[in-house]
Amino acid sequence: MTDLEKAADPSKLRRIAIEPVSRVEGHGKVTILLDDQNRVHQVRLHIVEFRGFERFIQGRPYWEVPVMVQRLCGICPVSHHLAASKALDRVVGARRVTRTAELVRRLMHYGQILQSHALHFYHLSSPDLLLGFESEPERRNVVGVLAAYPDIARQGVMLRKFGQEAIRITAGKRVHGTGSIPGGVNKSVSASERDELARALPQVLEWARLGVRMVAELHAKNRDTYERFGTVRSSLLSLVGRDGKLDLYDGVLRARDADGAIIFDGVEPDDYHAQLRENVRSWSYMKFPFIRSRGAETGWYKVGPLARIQNCDAIGTPLAETARQELMATSPGALIHAPLLFHWARMIELLHAAEVIGGLLDDPDLQGHDLTTSGPRATSGVGIIEAPRGTLIHHYEVDSQDLVTMCNLIVSTTHNNQAMNEAIRQVAREYLDGHEPTEGLLNHIEVAIRAFDPCLSCATHALGKMPLWVEIVDARGDVLQRLTRDGERSPG
Amino acid sequence: MNDDRPRFTLDDQEVAFTPGQTILEAALAAGTYVPTLCHHPEFAPHGSCKVCTVRVNGRTQSSCTTPAHPGDVVELHSEELDDLRKSLVQLLFTEGNHFCPSCEQSGNCQLQAVGYELGVVSGHFNPLFPTRPVDASHPDVLLDLNRCILCELCVRASAQVDRKSVFALSGRGITKHLVVNAESGRLGDTDLAVEDKAMSVCPVGVILRKRRGFRVPIGERKYDRRPISEVALDEAEGERR
């Protein structure tokens, strides 16, 4: 239990709810408990959605899984589609998919990274960053950005469109396609499809460079706020390529502590459970993962763009690596923990995605015909991918009749659960504590949440594991009966 | 061309037919699509789904089982009949568990295609969400009863073509369901083989080759490029050749 997670005596405090948290994917709320002097006693990010994918995937045929689980999300379905496919590659004995299949999947994935990052920055977060945290709420949205900065808003729309087209070409649809199957893909990319993307790429690269420059300039103009706002030190987790470079599609797990020292490295996806555990709290549908060796209280960590670009040794594409060096130079010799710098890291990854797509389009094997492979069957498989929001883990067990018997999903937003809660508590301490809450001040809380780009729909997929707390109260508010299923003590 | 065959009227148009043809067969041959789910040209008319319902001289009939007669006045499309057909399809969707977004037959499914053709955009009725376990006991075939619409095409194919009688319907009314001919009730204990005719006639996604799902990309599935009203007419023409 951390400071501001639980007030000593909630009954005497005033409750403010930010509900729903806006400009994020999914439905969540923040509750803040204040005393008469507006001192903050408790701040919590609650995810109020309820899904249940881990349960209802059980008993279904394994080949249905990559298509079914992607319905967890409308923004990053490709990540679930591919993580499930990678896990089930193991089940069908495809230790390594064909080169064409890997290239097609990478094109789909980097298209997804590009469109999701563009959506998040330009549509969801740029209103705060360009117009101001406390600007008029009626204008603090993408329409307001379109009015004040039409070129920037248009670039965001067009960047996203390009990423969506890469997904359509590889998956058959812009949202919820079927391109990736256990053991490979169901189509490659034709010459005309490749040319369609290649024609648009130079402009996309230019817009991506402008995006990185814009975020760097925003940081330079308001450096103190950017580096202090909601900053909480924590460990970092991500996949890195087997060569240590940034790889968002495949690799091994690496974790660093808050000072940058390696906690573990080279962890194969199959061994994730030896390093990571999940905890459950009584007040949230979202689980709280932690690094096993550090324990539940202190083992929490951040994932996502800021974790990834600091966890890797380098980025393998020149423009993005130069941009990464520029970001790292703002904090020489120390890791960056400021949530607002997620935006800078996100735009660097957007640029990286555009560069990677350029390389993929130049590869003739993208048009190959060797689409699937298989080998000796296995009864379980783990697939890990770096989704736009961070590390995404899919784990399945499949019986001899081809039906799924176990599904465990640890999604990006869940990894960031504690970090988001700590960030909003930090913001509450600095901006809200002792002040009469205003819409603008409360938006500061949302700004901190948005920096992590949470996908609250993805994050609430568990069924049967959530804590339950029912209170029956009389008209005066006195509790007559309390029924609990104590999630605090339930293992994740 | 001089066509002296007998004729009937179908929605104000004259349709020539060959004696012995049903109204549905004659309509298809004349280039008019009639929605149906239980009809298959290789099997005798069944008349169970009622989606092909027409009004013949004012009487409601299944067009797949009603022989064409000279001078008949047949109503295929009217607001009432179109609504009736739509409701029948909506009832089929809500009686079973039809989750098109994750169904491997999506794009190849006749129920889905007919739904699109009739403008079904929701189930309309409260879904029953029946509990129907998947039978995966066969090494090569998955039986997903969630999607069964009781058309009996598999029953007919297995009995009449395969001579195995692997499938049958059991129960009455809303409890009617597909069963397999094995003491255990499990598909794996039958002699169904992937080459059987019963494997290829299911209009929905009940009888499936295992480990093949989603291998056909979006854009190349049966109803991706053209609606069932066009595909069905082409198929009918192919049958006549």
Image: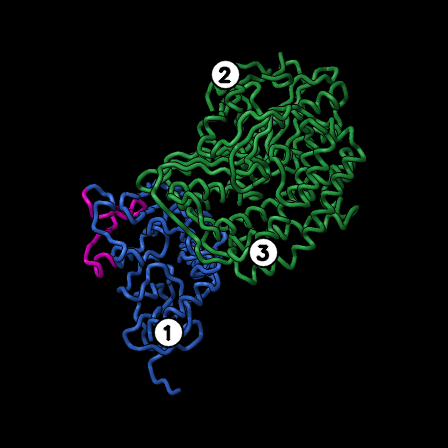
Chain colours: A green, B blue
B46 left or right of A492? Answer: left
Q: CA distance from mark 1 to mark 3?
A: 50 Å
A471 left or right of B109? Answer: right
Query: Considering depth in this image, is B60 or B193 the residue closer to the camera?
Result: B193
Q: CA distance from mark 1 to mark 2?
A: 70 Å
Which percent across, then down, holds residue A174?
A: 56, 52
A249 left or right of B230? Answer: right
Q: Could you tell me which chain the residue with mark 3 belongs to? A: A
Describe the element under mark 3 as helix, strand or loop. Answer: loop
Describe the element under mark 1 as helix, strand or loop. Answer: helix
The reply to whether residue B86 is in sight is no
Q: Quadrant of the N terminus of chain A?
A: top right
Describe the element under mark 2 as helix, strand or loop. Answer: strand
**Which residue is pictured at 52% across the width and 14% down the height?**
A480
Reply above or below: B193 against A74: below
Query: Considering depth in this image, is B184 or A357 the residue closer to the camera?
Result: A357
Looking at the rendered structure, the kind of residue marked 2 is Arg
Q: CA distance from mark 2 to mark 3?
A: 64 Å
Between disc 1 and disc 3, the foreground one is: 3
Q: Could you tell me which chain the residue with mark 1 belongs to? A: B
Which percent across, then down, holds residue B8?
A: 37, 76
- Magenta extent: B156-183
Residue under pointer 3 = A362
Q: Could you tell me which chain the residue with mark 2 belongs to? A: A
Q: Which mark is residue A482?
A: 2
Q: Are marks 2 and 3 in contact (CB under 8 Å)?
A: no
Looking at the rendered structure, the kind of residue marked 1 is Ala
Residue under pointer 1 = B29
Query: Considering depth in this image, is B97 or A221 the residue closer to the camera?
Result: A221
A392 left or right of A441? Answer: left
Is disc 2 surrounded by few (<14), some (14 to 19) or many (20+) residues within 10 Å? few
